[in-house]
């Protein structure tokens, strides 16, 4: 599209403004993490690495970190299985109520977290009479993580033809063999991307967690939340904040690379690259509330 | 060796028997695939929402404080008649709408630049820069804004002065938090619009503004609606941001505060965002937004 210099200037201004809005706050929290002060005074009085060491040594933060990792891994595993099954049914089969499935999958993430949280809590305590634990947290997280895997898998399956699977079946392979040797390799990168985003989503979640976690347990966001209020821990909280920002970028970055590599690969096939980028990124978009 | 062959062939024939069972029965195949996910979501999730709804019609015993499992409309009565609840619901919906509009306005220039102006390389860089920092670390970001807007914080240091109005503070932080959920679908939606449509409009003599209004906007609108589902819903239920950067109550705060001492009332108030979101989703689906999720 041809655009005039003035429009281009305006657009660039908009881009710069949005990027500044995104990055300046993150830079500020990054600087605080190295501040030698123990309050939130600005500008920071001096420079130190001390808080990072203290953050690594803080048993509360460390335990909470490992709890978060554990919860996110199990929730992601459940989400991969359920999301993949649902995507195969929706893309490869026609049945009554097919449109409803995507609605059903999206619902846990489209409804506010507080609704999901309080609904699950009532069900656990009143219907099943089970105590809250890490298990109940995993159930909650898996429920809203399904959509991420599902969306990535559906986007991939829609672009790949079912004829390979039919050929495999015609050659005498069992459905399980076909799934393992044809369908799964084709979906692999999409599933990994979906899994990484599901992991990030679970790792970051606090609202549903608040309602489903047992009193003595802490995930990292919960640790964070309870330590805001303690002035003594303030510098450590700053250091953990900076670490979380950096750490949480890793899975998202890898997921993005996987999606764009696939785009480069697909570019050879009949110039569908452009549409591919759109759908892939759109699939990622639903990833994280 | 022989034994291994036997088991292998037995296994294969079991596999084939299974294949025979499913062969030519697409409904059965779909059913087998759907049993797990649909079972989980319907029993685990829809079932939980039903429990929540039922709880909303229960009450707490006046003297005992115990949950009384008898049908009553008192919670809904309270929510509908006491003006404070209406005020809080109205305020929450207003903020959700404002955040959505703000994010749509902020998202459009950068999404358009990425989709239609930037070189492939530049586009890659921009997508990564938008995605990475904003994808996670929700709590860290709220905390960051709380720090920036604190007394003696960065905003007062640069002389701008931190906003003191609670609504403005919550609006600012939420617009920041949910921005990527708008940028990505809008970008993907713009990317889908063929360049030849834009050239055609130009060739037919349309002013760029006219092209924007009559070609781009109608085509990208469903994608904006798709993004708005998230910006709207996330704002509607958040209680942590208001708690950390303001002293004002939103729907989420009321539900959270009542959760431990009056569960039925909390459940009744939680139906407000459910009803609002279901209407929102149905409208969004009609507008074609689900294609852009």
Image (tube, coloured by chain):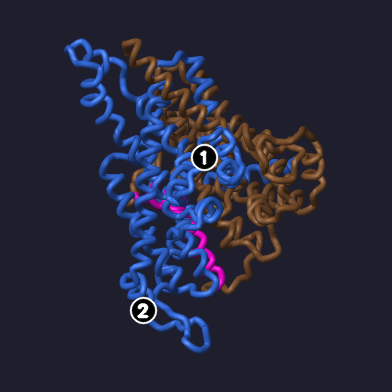
Query: Given this view, does label 2 or label 1 mark the residue nearer the observer?
Result: 1
Image x and y of residue B288, in percent: 29, 39
Q: What element carries label 1?
A: loop
Q: What stretch is highlighted in magenta?
A: A100-125
Marked residue chain, label 2:
B
Q: Please tell me whether residue A113 belongs to the stretch shown in magenta.
A: yes
User: Mark 2 or 1 closer to N-term?
Assistant: 2
Confirm whether residue A156 shows in the render.
yes
Q: Chain A is drawn in which colour?
A: brown
Which residue sits at x=23%, y=26%? B213
- Residues A67 and B210: in front is B210
Element on which disc 2 rests: helix
Residue A259 place in picture, x, y as percent = 53, 28
What secondary structure is the magenta-colored segment mainly? helix
Which chain is blue in the rendering?
A: B
Going 33% across and 68% down the picture, which residue do you hit? B83
Q: How crowded is mark 1: few (under 14 residues within 10 Å), some or many (20 or more)?
A: some
């Amino acid at each position: 599209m041809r655009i005039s210099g003035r429009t281009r200037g305006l657009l660039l201004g908009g881009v710069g403004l949005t990027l500044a809005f995104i990055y300046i706050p993150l830079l500020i929290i990054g600087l605080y993490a190295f501040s030698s002060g123990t309050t939130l005074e600005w500008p920071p009085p001096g420079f130190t690495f001390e808080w990072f060491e203290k953050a690594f040594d803080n048993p509360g933060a460390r335990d909470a970190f490992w709890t978060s990792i554990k919860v996110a891994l199990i929730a992601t595993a459940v989400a991969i299985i359920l999301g993949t099954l649902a995507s195969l049914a929706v893309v490869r089969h026609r049945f009554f109520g097919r449109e409803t499935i995507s609605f059903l999958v999206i619902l846990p993430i489209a409804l506010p977290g507080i609704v999901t949280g309080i609904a699950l809590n009532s069900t656990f305590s009143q219907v099943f009479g089970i105590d809250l634990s890490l298990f109940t947290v995993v159930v909650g997280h898996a429920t809203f993580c399904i959509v991420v895997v599902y969306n990535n898998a559906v986007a991939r399956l829609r672009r790949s033809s079912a004829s390979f699977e039919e050929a495999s079946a015609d050659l005498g392979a069992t459905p399980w063999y076909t799934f393992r040797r044809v369908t799964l390799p084709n979906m692999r990168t999409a599933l990994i991307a979906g899994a990484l985003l599901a992991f990030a989503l679970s790792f970051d979640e606090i609202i549903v967690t608040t309602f489903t976690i047992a009193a003595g347990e802490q995930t990292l966001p919960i640790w964070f939340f309870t330590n805001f209020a303690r002035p003594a821990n303030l510098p450590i909280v700053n250091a953990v904040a900076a670490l979380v920002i950096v750490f949480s970028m890793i899975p998202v970055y890898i997921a993005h690379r996987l999606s764009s590599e696939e785009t480069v690969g697909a570019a050879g096939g009949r110039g569908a690259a452009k549409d591919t980028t759109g759908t892939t990124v759109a699939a990622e978009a639903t990833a994280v509330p | 060796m022989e034994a291994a062959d036997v088991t292998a062939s037995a296994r294969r024939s079991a596999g084939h028997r299974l294949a025979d069972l499913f062969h030519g029965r697409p409904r059965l195949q779909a059913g087998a695939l759907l049993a797990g996910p649909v079972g989980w979501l319907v029993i685990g999730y829809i079932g939980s929402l039903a429990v929540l709804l039922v709880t909303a019609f229960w009450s707490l015993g006046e003297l005992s404080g115990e949950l009384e499992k008898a049908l009553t409309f008192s919670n809904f009565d309270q929510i509908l008649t006491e003006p404070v609840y209406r005020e809080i619901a109205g305020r929450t919906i207003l903020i959700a709408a404002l955040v959505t509009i703000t994010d749509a306005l902020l998202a459009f220039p950068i999404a358009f630049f990425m989709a239609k102006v930037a070189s492939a390389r530049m586009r890659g860089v921009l997508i990564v820069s938008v995605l990475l920092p904003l994808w996670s670390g929700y709590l860290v970001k709220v905390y960051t804004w709380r720090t920036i807007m604190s007394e003696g914080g960065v905003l007062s240091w640069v002389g701008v002065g931190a906003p003191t109005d609670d609504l403005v503070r919550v609006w600012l932080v939420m617009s920041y938090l949910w921005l990527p959920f708008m940028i990505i679908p809008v970008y993907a939606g713009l990317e889908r619009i063929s360049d030849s449509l834009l050239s055609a409009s130009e060739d037919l003599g349309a002013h760029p503004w006219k092209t924007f209004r009559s070609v781009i906007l109608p085509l990208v609108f469903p994608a904006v609606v798709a993004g708005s589902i998230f910006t709207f819903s996330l704002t509607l239920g958040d209680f942590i941001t208001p708690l950390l950067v303001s002293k004002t109550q939103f729907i989420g705060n009321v539900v959270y505060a009542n959760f431990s001492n009056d569960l039925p009332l909390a459940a009744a108030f939680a139906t407000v965002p459910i009803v609002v979101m279901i209407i929102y989703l149905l409208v969004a689906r009609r507008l074609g937004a689900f294609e852009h999720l």
